[in-house]
Image (spheres, rainbow, N blue to C red):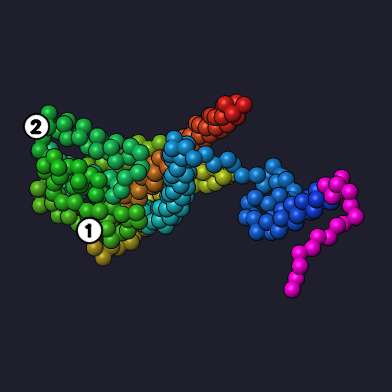
Amino acid sequence: NFQPCSINFPFTSSQRKVSKMKVSVLALLATLSTSAAFAPAAFRAPVNVEAPSHKDRKATIVNDGKANAIRDRIKSVNNTRKITMAMKLVAAAKVRRAQDAVVATRPFSETLQSVFGGLITRLGGEAVDLPLLTKRDINKVTLVVITGDRGLCGGYNAQMIKRAEARMAELKEAGIEYELVLIGKKGESYFKRREAPIAFSQDCGQNPSAKDANAISEKLLASYLAGETDTIELLYTKFVNLISSAPSTRTLVPLSASDIAGEEDEIFQLTSSSGEFSVEKTTAEAAEPQEFPNDMIFEQDPTQILNAILPLYINGQILRTMQESVASELAARMNAMQSASDNARDLSKRLSTEYNRARQAAVTQEILEIVSGASALE
């Protein structure tokens, strides 16, 4: 049997109070140390953490509708600028290929011109009895209009179409019938919607070949020799430089013997220096007429030889104008893409300024709200 008893400690009342306070403080410290181990990492005090440097500091992201919309638009504008710069470089590479094609056809043209001049000299004058050299009374004109197959090339296609419409208006006012031969999808789609008289159409492509030019020249010569048309005019874009090109018109048929023998040529070469593109222009003089000995006997009559050479010359001229038009289109696309890239860069700068202002305004507004809330609690 246990009996209740009391134990008397030899402490005074003041000593008991002090010992109770020590026990309470020790218990509080133990509790805090234990709870700190289970506290989330976000609420723990950082230990030995260095402040981030300025270069590692990221931009403040503002959760504001207007600022977010501006930031998304800046990204889209920068992506568009990358695309336009890539398209400019692609067009520059294609310009080089087009120029190489022109240079490759130059030896054949020079030889053809030299033989033609020598035969004309041997005959002692112009062979006026050839069908392709004989002028007729003009009752009907065939207009060969060369445009591009694609857009995004500035005013290249629009200028060529405008030039064709002006020539059509001149012929209509003079009471002369006309028909169109359209080379290029842009011109074909434009004039088909307006129900213009179209003989036939064909794509231009980015790399015209002698096969394409031959298909066009055969149809044109067949129409001319059959008497269906009296003259054939070629409307194309003449390559001047990388900045400008000029819509031009030349008579393809009938030909002039003196013009063929004395025609000069211009060769353009695309170069680059310090990251900038430029064009070097070279003028090639007319080929010297080939000299045939007086005692040379031709197996065929020189007139028949000329009659066989002229279709080759016309084929070469069509190919050359198609190549020059393609070079002009690519140069116009280079300029258009460069302008688009510059505009995108300027727009990105303006949007960045506007975004920074919106971000600063949002941060300032948040600071004012915090200060106002703290003042209200005092």
In the rendered picture of this protein, how many numbered marks are placed on residues?
Answer: 2
Q: Nearer the viewer, residue 40 or 28?
A: 28
Magenta segment includes 350: no
Crowding around mark 1 (Cα neighbors within 10 Å: few <14, some 14 to 19, many 20+) is few
Judged by its main secondary structure, the magenta piece is loop
- Residue 46: % across, % down: 72, 50
Looking at the image, is 253 positioned above or below residue 35? above
| Quarter of the image that includes the N terminus | bottom right
What amino acid is at disc 1? Ala
Which residue is pictured at 31% across the width and 45% down the height?
A: 151
- Residue 284: % across, % down: 44, 45
Residue 175, labelled with which disc? 2
Determine whether, in the image, residue 43 is placed left or right of residue 64.
right
Q: Which residue is mark 1?
A: 215
Which residue is pictured at 56% across the width and 29% down the height?
A: 373
Boundaries of the magenta span: 1-18
Q: Nearer the viewer, residue 361 or 292?
A: 361
Residue 356, labelled with which disc? none
- Residue 148: % across, % down: 30, 47
Determine whether, in the image, residue 79 is placed left or right of residue 126.
right
What amino acid is at disc 2? Gly
Which residue is pictured at 52% across the width and 32% down the height?
A: 362
Q: Nearer the viewer, residue 11 or 252?
A: 11
Which comes before the other along the chain, label 2 or label 1? Answer: 2
| Quarter of the image that includes the C terminus | top right
Residue 48 visible somewhere in the drawing:
no
Which residue is pictured at 27% across the width and 58% down the height?
A: 212
Considering the numbered disc 2 on the image, is that residue within a helix, a strand or a loop? loop
